[in-house]
Amino acid sequence: MASLLIFVTLLHLITLAVLFIATMEKSWWVWDGTEHSDLWYNCRFDNETEAWFCASSEETDWLQAVQVLMVLSVVFSAISFLIFLGQLFTISKGGLFYLTGVCQAFAGLNAFTAVLIYTLRNKEILEDSRELSSGHFGYCFYLAWVCVPLLLCSGIMYIHLRKRE
């Protein structure tokens, strides 16, 4: 039981950290390594000054939906962890961690919806940027996709986890 509890806790913390990085880091779409776009900024590398220049992303409805869903995913995952800690010390023997599991699964569904929107609507989200055919998805996009099954699996594990003495 102790090893399962440690595994679930570590999985939750790692997933939360990766989800936070995927939401805040600057690489959802990349062009040639000299320009990238994320949920918040479009950045270009200037060879003369050897510095990155970033401007706020054009706020389209699709981008705002992705931003809101990713932030909600981080918030629900963090709340889920706090609920888990609270339930760990207050729930009676044999009790299940339903609320923790539901919050974690909801965080996974939010992340899934966000990355699915970004996948299907990246042309509308990046409409004022350079030609999309010369770019590709960045590592934060892939991190967000990796978080989806991890969040859903940990949510299911919490729902089936039973407190023992």
Image: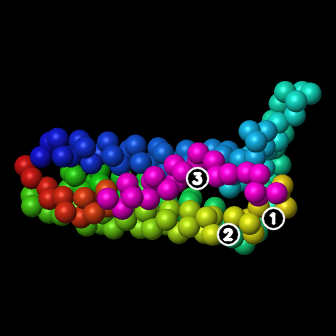
How many residues crowd around disc 3 within 10 Å: few (fewer than 14), some, or many (20 or more)?
many
The residue labelled by disc 2 is: 121
CA gap between label 3 and label 1 equals 18 Å
Q: Residue at x 88, y 30 (%)?
A: 47
Q: Of all residues shown, which one is farthest toward the right?
A: 48
Q: Which residues are magenta?
A: 131-153
- The circle drawn on residue 69 is none
Residue type beneath disc 1: Glu
Residue type beneath disc 3: Phe
Q: Residue at x 80, y 53 (%)?
A: 56
Q: Are marks 3 and 2 in contact (CB under 8 Å)?
A: no
The residue labelled by disc 1 is: 127
Left-right relation of 21 to 7: right
User: Residue 28: in sight, yes or no?
Assistant: no
Q: Are marks 1 and 2 in contact (CB under 8 Å)?
A: no
Front residue of this view, candidates 95 and 22: 22
Residue 134 rendering spot, x and y as whole percentages = 77, 51
